[in-house]
Image (cartoon, grey):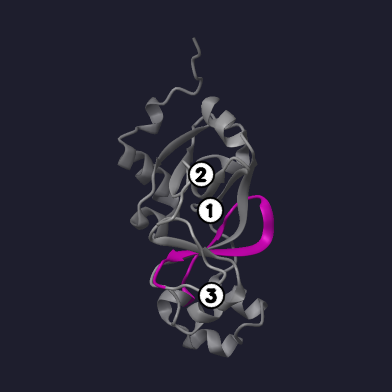
């Protein structure tokens, strides 16, 4: 069992009134939430760089070897995980693959940020479900709670289907629909008594 913070393994959805353009219409998967702060990944913004191109740039494989990668892995969409450490890679994945550096996020989702998982994905021995990001979104202690209270974010349960699917453009609306929310009917301003 993984000891979770309240937001671990949940989605944050930017409210329509989000003033920070970097987060407009984003779906963020939270992987660490504690009294020290919060870390998550934007999962619905693609990078212009493909996974096999990234592996070639990192020197993990050659251009010729990229053709031999399993199609599912060769076409993996690399996502813009957030504005922090945008040159650093992170892999969210199913728990069927673990190395010493893998960190459980929930009972069935892990995060690994070392090159060994990239080698495993490239040769087809990696996890069944994989999501690669460059960068992450981070909040200081208490910051995300203040933003939620200020009506910047909606919180909902994350499902592996929505987390790992590659339909990035429709993901925000599908997560809203899963919650039973019509974004057009959301009030931008929060009321306080």
Asked if one can make out residue 153 in the rendered structure from this viewpoint, the answer is: yes
List x then y, in percent, for residue 13.
47, 40
Instruction: Residue 177: name its quadrant.
Output: top left
Measure the alpha-carbon separation of dots 3 and 1: 22 Å
Residue drawn 53% across the image and 53% down it: 45
Residue, x 50% and y 80% (percent of image)?
A: 120
Q: Residues within 10 Å of mark 2 (few under 14, many from 20)?
A: many
Determine contact: label 3, label 1, CB under 8 Å: no
Q: Is residue 13 above or below residue 119?
A: above
Q: Earlier in the sequence, mark 1 or mark 2?
A: 2
Q: Gap in Å between the C-alphas at discs 2 and 3?
A: 26 Å
Q: Earlier in the sequence, mark 2 or mark 3?
A: 2
Mark 1 highlights which residue? 45
Secondary structure of residue under mark 2? loop
**Residue at x 54%, y 58% (from the top left corner):** 46
Region in magenta: 74-96
The answer to whether residue 166 of the structure is visible from this angle is no
Mark toward the viewer: 2 or 3: 3
Is the Cβ of the residue at disc 1 closer than 8 Å to that at disc 2?
yes
Residue under numbered circle 3:
117
């Amino acid at each position: 069992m993984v000891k979770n913070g309240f937001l671990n393994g949940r989605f944050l959805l930017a409210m329509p009134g989000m003033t920070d353009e970097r987060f407009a219409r984003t779906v963020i998967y939270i992987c660490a939430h504690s009294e020290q702060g919060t870390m998550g990944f934007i999962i619905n913004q693609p990078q212009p760089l493909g996974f096999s191109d990234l592996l070639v740039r990192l020197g993990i494989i050659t251009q010729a070897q990229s053709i031999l990668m399993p199609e599912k892995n060769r076409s993996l969409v690399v996502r813009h995980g957030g504005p922090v450490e945008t040159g650093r890679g992170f892999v969210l994945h199913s728990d069927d693959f673990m190395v010493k550096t893998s960190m459980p996020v929930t009972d069935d989702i892990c995060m690994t940020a070392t090159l060994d998982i990239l080698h495993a994905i490239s040769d087809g021995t990696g996890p069944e479900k994989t999501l690669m990001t460059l960068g992450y979104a981070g909040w200081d202690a208490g910051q995300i709670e203040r933003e939620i209270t200020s009506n910047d974010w909606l919180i909902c349960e994350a499902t592996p289907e929505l987390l790992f699917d590659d339909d990035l453009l429709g993901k925000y609306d599908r997560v809203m629909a899963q919650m039973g929310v019509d974004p057009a009917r959301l009030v931008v301003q929060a009321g306080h008594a």
